[in-house]
Image: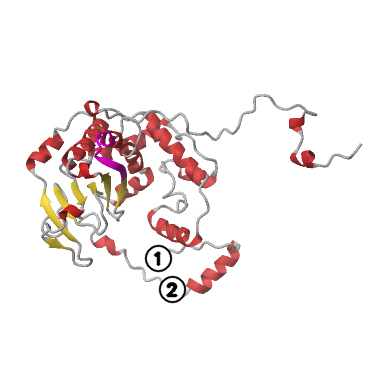
C-alpha cells in the first residue's frame, strides 16, 4: 500500500541509488488495502449509526468566528472501483461546479447579491474517499440572507433543474478544457515538499503514467497515451465523442443532485445557546434536525430558472489560444524593427 515520490535536483541514476539505499529494505507484506473491507458495500451515512443522518437533514453549528454560511451537500456514492476510476478520469464535478459557481450575468450568485442575501458562492467536490465524494455548494450569507436560507437553497435547486431540463452548451465544456490547459501550461513552480506529497497520493489513485497529469488535467479517459507521449497543450477535445463522454458523466452527476439526497449545514453565531449536542473532540455545539416536509416540497417545486433570471454563462471570447502572436507585416531586412536587440544596444561610433 506504499507509494513513494521523490522530487530533487539530482539526476535520475543518482536518485535511484538514494532511494534504493534509503527505502530498499522496507518489506512488502502483500496485504490488501484496509478499505477493501467496507468500500462499495457500507453506506457512508446511515440513520442511527452515523453522526449526521445525511438525507433531508439540517446541521446547525455554532462557529468560533463570526461566520454566516450555508452549504448544500450531496453524497455521491460509487457502486464499484471502475465507476470511481471513471469519475476521476472524466472529472464531471469540475464542469458542474463551474456552472453552479459562476459569477456572471444569470448566475446564482448574481441573483442572490441582487437581493442582498449573499457575499460569495462556491461549488466543488469534497470528502474524496475510496467509494464516495461529496458535491457541495457553499454560500457566504449576509445578515439578511441568514433569514432567507430556504429561498437561497430553492434558487440553487432552480438552477440545477435548468441543468437537467435544457442541454448544457458545448462551449461550456470547451472553455473549461481550454482554461484548465492554460493553467496547466503556465503553472508556477511550487515547493517540492507539497508537490512530492501530491504525487505520492496521485500514484494511489491514477494509472501508471498519469501521476502528474491525473489530478491536474481534464478529459483523461481517451487521451492517456497522447498525454504521456506528447507535451503539446490541448485547446479542444480530441473528438466529439470525447466531449460526449464528459457531457454524459456531467449529466449523471447532475441527476444525483436531488432534494431528497441532500443535506444542509448552516454556520451562525445566532445558534449560540440554542443547541442540544456537542461534538466529542472539539466540543463544537450543534443541532441536527430533519428538514420540514413543506420546505422539501417547496424545493421540489422550485421556481423556474428563467423566472429568477438564471441562465447559462455567456461564451467567454477572451480566452487566449496557443496560436501565438500574429504579425501582419513582417519587418524587411534593413528596417529598424528588423535589427536584433544586440544590434540596437551596440554603441554607434563617433563621426
Question: Would you call the spot at circle 2 few (<14 residues within 10 Å), some (14-19), or many (20 or more)?
Answer: few
- The residue range painted magenta reads 112-123
Question: Would you call the spot at circle 1 few (<14 residues within 10 Å), some (14-19), or many (20 or more)?
Answer: few
Q: Is residue 243 left or right of residue 146?
A: right
Task: Write the residue at 61% across / 29% down.
Answer: 326
Query: Picture quarter containing residue 106?
Result: top left
In this figure, which residue is indicated by the disc labeled 2?
26
Per the image, is 113 magenta? Answer: yes
In this figure, which residue is indicated by the disc labeled 1?
2
Q: Is residue 18 left or right of residue 327?
A: left
Pick the quarter of the image with the C terminus.
top right
Tag 1, which secondary structure? loop
Measured from the top left, where is residue 138 in percent x and y? 27, 46
Q: Nearer the viewer, residue 144 or 333?
A: 144
User: Would you say the residues marked 1 and 2 are in contact, meaning their CB atoms lie under 8 Å apart?
Assistant: yes
Measure the alpha-carbon separation of dots 1 and 2: 10 Å
Above or below — where is 326 with respect to 218? above
Amino acid at each position: 500500500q506504499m507509494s513513494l515520490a521523490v522530487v530533487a535536483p539530482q539526476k535520475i541514476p543518482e536518485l535511484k541509488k538514494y532511494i534504493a539505499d534509503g527505502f530498499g529494505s522496507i518489506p512488502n507484506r502483500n496485504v490488501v488495502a484496509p478499505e477493501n473491507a467496507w468500500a462499495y458495500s457500507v453506506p457512508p451515512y446511515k440513520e442511527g449509526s452515523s453522526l449526521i443522518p445525511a438525507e433531508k437533514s439540517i446541521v446547525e453549528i455554532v462557529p468560533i468566528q463570526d461566520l454566516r454560511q450555508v452549504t448544500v451537500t450531496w453524497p455521491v456514492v460509487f457502486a464499484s472501483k471502475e465507476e470511481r476510476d471513471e469519475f476521476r478520469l472524466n472529472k464531471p464535478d469540475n464542469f458542474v461546479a463551474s456552472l453552479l459557481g459562476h459569477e456572471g450575468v444569470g448566475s446564482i450568485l448574481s441573483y442572490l447579491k441582487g437581493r442582498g442575501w449573499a457575499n460569495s458562492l462556491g461549488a466543488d467536490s469534497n470528502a474524496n474517499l475510496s467509494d464516495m465524494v461529496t458535491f457541495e455548494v457553499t454560500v457566504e450569507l449576509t445578515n439578511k440572507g441568514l433569514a432567507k436560507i430556504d429561498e437561497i437553497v430553492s434558487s440553487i435547486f432552480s438552477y440545477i433543474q435548468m441543468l437537467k431540463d435544457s442541454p448544457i452548451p458545448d462551449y461550456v465544456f470547451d472553455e473549461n478544457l481550454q482554461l484548465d490547459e492554460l493553467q496547466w501550461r503556465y503553472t508556477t513552480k511550487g515547493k517540492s515538499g507539497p508537490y512530492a506529497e501530491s504525487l505520492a497520493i496521485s500514484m494511489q489513485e491514477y494509472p501508471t503514467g498519469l501521476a502528474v497529469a491525473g489530478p491536474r488535467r481534464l478529459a483523461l479517459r481517451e487521451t492517456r497515451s497522447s498525454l504521456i507521449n506528447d507535451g503539446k497543450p490541448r485547446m479542444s477535445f480530441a473528438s466529439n465523442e470525447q466531449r460526449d463522454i464528459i457531457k454524459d458523466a456531467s449529466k449523471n452527476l447532475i441527476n444525483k443532485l436531488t432534494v431528497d439526497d441532500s443535506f444542509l449545514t448552516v454556520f451562525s453565531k445566532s445558534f449560540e445557546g440554542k443547541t442540544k449536542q456537542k461534538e466529542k473532540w472539539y466540543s463544537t455545539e450543534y443541532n441536527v434536525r430533519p428538514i420540514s416536509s413543506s420546505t422539501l416540497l417547496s424545493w421540489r417545486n422550485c421556481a423556474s430558472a428563467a423566472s429568477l433570471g438564471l441562465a447559462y454563462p455567456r461564451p467567454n471570447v477572451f480566452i487566449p489560444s496557443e496560436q501565438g502572436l500574429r504579425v501582419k507585416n513582417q519587418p524587411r531586412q534593413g528596417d529598424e524593427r528588423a535589427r536584433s536587440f544586440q544590434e540596437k544596444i551596440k554603441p554607434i561610433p563617433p563621426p
